[in-house]
Amino acid sequence: MSKRVYNFSAGPAVLPEKVLQQAADDMLNYQGCGMSVMELSHRSSTYQKIIDDAEAGLRKLMDIPANYKVLFLQGGASMQFAMIPMNFGINKKADYINSGEWSGKAIKEAKKLGMDVNVVASSDASTFSFFPEVDVSKVRKDADYLHITSNNTIYGTKCMEAPKVSIPLIADMSSNIMSEKFDVKDYAMIYAGAQKNIGPAGVVIVIIREDMIGKVSGLPTMLDYKTHVDSGSMFNTPPTYGIYIAKLVFDHMLSLGGVAYYEELNKKKAAIIYDAIDNSKLFKAHVKPGKDRSLMNIPFFTDKPELNDKFLKEASAEGLVTLKGHRSVGGMRASVYNAMPIEGCQKLADFIKKFDQANS
């Protein structure tokens, strides 16, 4: 097998090698059952144990209280943009913090469904180069919920300090779930697409407080959270293999010390890359130094498009791949999720320094 590269993709993203090896070992014959996990009936006791163990692992990692339900769904985080206003829109009022493209899409979907949307704070005017300060006095007391996106995958900002509000707080944590410690109890609901810090594309995790379930009746069956709570994520065939990989990732994380271990590691990894960018002559980070900088997604660029292209080409030749920035921003972006080894971050930082010296 050819040597593995360092994959800085924003998603689908790098997975732990030990997890991939375990999946390879189990591929043809999972624990002696004579078939692959991909071939198992989701109604079998063998598969039920997989999904039960996956939930137990996630609960332990995130210290999820007993009065929260854990769901393994499909449709990605984007499906939640519609399901949230549909399930919680009693007063047809929703407050949002606009911190980037994905929060913007969530806002657009809520409006499409007839919600009276109040954008409490936005950094749109500054190209989302910081996480907007939230004045909680602007949050409506009769709004059905306040929605935030805790990490900006495209622009590289984050907010892991939950606004203290009296209405239900809902967070899209797709790109930084389990990367830092936070208190689940601060949120009425958390959701995250799996393809960044959890597993392969195709699974979305929903963590929802029990009192949020069944608020609205008459919804399409598959778009009602109560349907999936009542059926234990088994109303229809779930993405069985993706949940199995997520279970392996959770097991791997727990074996290393859980979220606390990864938070410390992620701070070191991000600092290595930010330091190389900040101390260079050619490169600039999209987000200025400070608390708003994401630990997961680091957009950076030079002032010359041709230099950006040269950097990407030469980096790829060095085994540093998928560094091209999002099409709406350009430049480069290093996504350094939990599974990115610190050696990959160091190699990228060393290459940034080398390129800077050779092209300044």
Image (cartoon, rainbow, N blue to C red):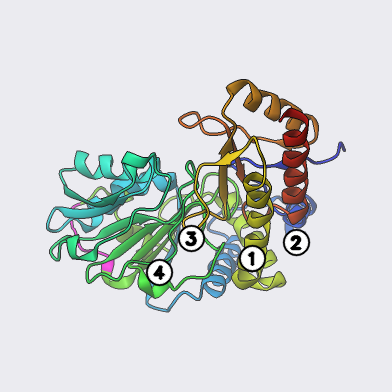
| Residue positioned 20% across, 42% down in the render | 111
Q: Tag 4: residue type?
A: Lys
Say what secondary structure mark 2 lies in.
Answer: helix
| Residue positioned 52% across, 33% down in the render | 326
| Near-viewer residue (325 or 23) | 325
Say what secondary structure mark 1 lies in.
Answer: helix
Q: Tag 2: residue type?
A: Gln
Query: x, y (%) of residue 61?
Result: 57, 71
Foreground: disc 1 or disc 4: 1
- Labels 3 and 4: the sequence-earlier one: 4
Foreground: disc 3 or disc 4: 3
Q: What residue is pinned by disc 1?
A: 262
Q: What residue is pinned by disc 4?
A: 69
**Spatial CA span between label 3 and label 2:** 45 Å
Badge 2 crowding class, 10 Å Cα cut-off, few under 14, some 14 to 19, many 20 or more, is few
Q: Is residue 204 above or below residue 187?
A: above
Query: x, y (%) of residue 38?
Result: 64, 47
| Residue positioned 18% across, 60% down in the render | 138
Kindly identify which numbered label has been placed on residue 291: 3
In the displayed structure image, the side of residue 358 where residue 331 appears, left or right = left
Direction right: furthest residue: 1
Q: What residue is pinned by disc 2?
A: 31
**Spatial CA span between label 4 and label 2:** 28 Å
Q: Is residue 359 above or below residue 137?
A: above
Say what secondary structure mark 4 lies in.
Answer: strand
Q: Tag 3: residue type?
A: Lys
Badge 3 crowding class, 10 Å Cα cut-off, few under 14, some 14 to 19, many 20 or more, is few
Asked if the stretch drawn in magenta spans residue 271, the answer is: no
